[in-house]
Image: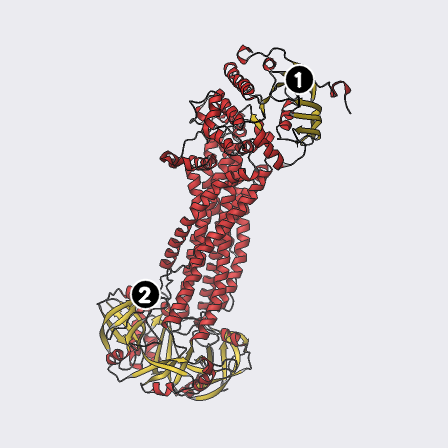
Amino acid sequence: MIDTSTAILPALDGPRGQSVFQARGITKIYRMGEVQVQALRGVDLELYPSEFVVLLGPSGSGKSTLLNILGGLDVPTSGTVRYKDKDLSAEDDTLLTGYRRNHVGFVFQFYNLIPSLTARENVALITEIAANPMTPEEALRLVGLGERMNHFPSQMSGGEQQRVAIARAIAKRPDVLLCDEPTGALDVTTGIVVLDVIARVNRELGTTTAVITHNSVIADMADRVITLSNGRIAGQKKNSVKRSANELVW
Amino acid sequence: MLRDLWQMRGQALAICMVMACGVAAFVMSLNMLHSLESTQERYYEDYQFPDVFAHLKRAPKSLLEQLVEIPGVSQAQARIVEDVCLDLPTLPEPAVGRLISLPERGEAMMNRLYLRRGRWLEPGRTEEVLANEAFTDAHGLHPGDRLVAIINGRRQDLRIVGVVLSPEYIYQIRPGDMLPDAKRFGVLWMNEADLAAAFDMEGAFNDLTLRIMPGASAQEVVRRVDRLASDYGSAGAYGREDQVSNVFIINELRQLRSMALIVPIIFLSVAAFLMNIVITRLIGTQREQVATLKAFGYGRLEIGWHYLKMVLVLVAVGTAIGTAAGAWMGSGLTALYTRFFHFPVLRYSLDPQVIGLGFLICAVSASLGAVGAVRRAMRQPPAEAMRPEPPQSFRPTLVERLGLQRFFSPALRMILRQMERRPMRAVLSAVVIALAVAILVVGDFASDAVQYSLDTHFLLAQRQDVTVLFAEPNEGRVVYDLTHLPGVRCCESFRNVPVRLRFGPRSRRMGIQGVAQQGELNRLIDNQQHRIALPAEGLVLSRKLAEVLGVRVGDSLTVEVLEGTRPVREILVADLLEDFLGMNAYMERSALNRLMREGPLVSGAYLAVDSARMDELYAKLKNCPGVAVVVVKAAALKSFKDTIAENLLVFKSFLVVFACIIAFGVVYNSVRITLAERARELATLRVIGFTRAEVSRILLGELAVLTVVAIPGGLWFGYVLAKLDTMANDTELFRLPLWIEPSTYGFAAVVTLLAALVSGLIVRRQIDRLDLVSVLKSKE
């Protein structure tokens, strides 16, 4: 059963030619015990090179599910997702692992650093396995943590930990940076610092960036804002003027 | 609670199995001990096993009256006992038959027989004998079958009418022999009149058994018997502690007792350790639940009881499995015992008290393991417990601080830092894995040491094929006659003199073996397989004998000769010999002749024989007058080796199973717990692009490091345990050499590695099922 009013929206033209991601009609149904939860109800989406996209929506709108599918952590129940020439909707662990390893950088709400490793080592974990990485030092300097490389996660503030997580995500020079509520666990001031770093990475490295958040203020930073509601794309808009992170207030 | 248990069923099962091993060993050995002890006690009592024994040359029956007068003696019985050669159709070589007289009328007073098959002897019927069961079984003989004994040089036909068992021959070995050999040693009972006639012993006897009154001193009776019997060629009276069959049983009981103690201690401590880490983890995951319950007003005791109940369920399951396994192993062990120990009935009985005790010990040790973790849970104030556990802090490990970090990948650093953060857990895990290795080493060590000592003793030291014992000491020229028998390549005579060696208050009855100084058929070889030179004068004693007597090289021993004119002499201890079997005293043969102030007498001869002409030689020896006993080494050695090899294999298989359960239990549990504690970390690694194999390597790396560290430690520990084993087994009967084959170490290492690998692989499957998305969502 397709709700025609929201199923297909006219795709906006990409700002820079060929799309990086193409999602067509993706749905996702979770089985939680005996209850079926439909997280996505047919989503079409394209992301373009160097684009900064914010996925906005309340909790339960399906934005995290969408991000997980784009990141190769999960596969859709139906529909197709392509990253360049790769089919991400096939349940092929080797392909998805390789994709995550070489093309995607993840940033999570709770940082997910390895507590037994220092900042530098957390980043080095990635630089040792990625195809074309920068050095851990380079990545950490990029997020402004050149001075704290030998600190353990337990010795750093939340904002610093999140910046280490960003350094870890970008050290492999990913094609796409996916951030799931990156400021969700941070206060305003530190949140802004983190967002500033994300924007800088997008600007300086040209990494396609998708940030999901329920904080609509962050949307002002984006090239494009996609609003999700109840498993569907409820609307999209392009910002003619992007605001920088330190202009944001919430 | 049952849900909790079901959740951790793998780990719970591992703990149960380890406990089960301990309980099984406990139940098996303690019940076996009780069964054996009570069977032996009843058998001794019901069949009147004597307290004092003596063998004489020939004494008039009137002596008996004086013997009964000895204070403390309740009964005395005279018998005629003679060793003869048996000619059996099923055996080319001659066997040794021991003929024992039975009173013509009525039952024997002591050493009563249990009739298994057939009937008792009928008075007046010559040729009838009763034969012991082990011997008839070994030859497939039945009542009605015949055999030939060479009695005083005459072939005499004997007919078996009954198959019997005697408390005197529960462990059936000829005194002086090292190995039991039912095929070549038979005990036969005959009517006294027949035996007396055959050996010219009418009105006389040569074997004495006494029972003493409760509370009387056997030692005192022995002393007085010696005084009365010495004129009749007594080789010295002795008590039960020197009765061969009894000595072997006592020795076995002692081993069972230590097994009932040591093995369960090992397993139950491991179980306690596992219980501790598993419950700690469980409570860690249930912090909030515990806090909520406490906030609702549940008391500390109620919460503690909740976890202890869980422990008790595991203990109950472990005890049940262990009891079943113990009962099964016990009946197997009983079957093994019946090969060596011949009781009318040896039934393995399960004593509910032992099972109850097993449960109790298990419960106490498991609770001790759990109590630390449970106490921490009970102490937590609810508000604190509701908050998640504080973040873990780490620091560079010691090796890294030493500047070695550039050699380590981040993954290896994760492993090392995890281990250093919980050093106790890492150390204990490694210790337990090492324990498994050690158990495997010890399991194989027993067979290595037995093989080594048998080979050293029977192949390097004793190189004769056949030993011939004469009925009476003979002039040395008999050797020439023997040399000319068919197939004999080499012949060396020896002189054996029964003596009592005395040093201060300590003494031992035994024989001095006088052998040729340059002899090649019976050499003195120590436990390093080095040949010890036999000095021209003085005694060479087994190290153990010297220890028992308290003598050192250079000391002078009193030798009381127990044959002939019974001279008493002083003699120097010239050297000690570290040997394996029995307690021996060696002397140069002519020096022994000089000591005895006799001519070149010999008691027997060692023969090296051309194997192709063995049967010819046997045929001659069977009919050789003057030859009392013929011992064939290879045959005895082979049958013993086969039996013992089979037993050791059973023993080893149990230990392999036990060790694998320990190794598996520890490895599986620690990996499961690591997985639970670090699921989020591992999921993060998967998300950022680590493959399953790479993540598994990090998870299992810790285990690999522990195993690799534990194995050399375990091999060393095994060596130490083997050493303790040799110390525990340093008995007068046998001494284990500390000899471990390299293959034993290899086997222990490989089996442990495999057990670790298998449990690692089982847990690895869980990594494949790691739910990436949900792990990332939650904050721990």
- Residue at the image point whose x is 21% and y is 67% from the top: B554
Letter of the chain that mark 2 sits on in the rendering: B
Image coordinates of residue A215 in percent, x first then y, are 60, 15
In terms of depth relative to the viewer, which is nearer, B554 or B63?
B554
Residue annotated with mark 1: A227
Residues at circles 1 and 2 in contact by the CB criterion of under 8 Å: no
Q: Is residue A23 visible?
A: yes
Image coordinates of residue A227 in percent, x first then y, are 66, 17
Q: Amino acid at mark 1?
A: Thr
The N terminus of chain A: image quadrant: top right
In this picture, residue B691 sits left or right of residue B48: right
Give residue B578's mark: 2
Residue farthest to the front, as pictured:
A17
Q: Amino acid at mark 2?
A: Glu
Label 2 crowd bin: few (<14), some (14–19), many (20+), radius 10 Å: some
Asked which secondary structure carries label 1, the reply is: strand
Letter of the chain that mark 1 sits on in the rendering: A
Q: Is residue B364 visible?
A: no
Location of residue A6 (image quadrant): top right
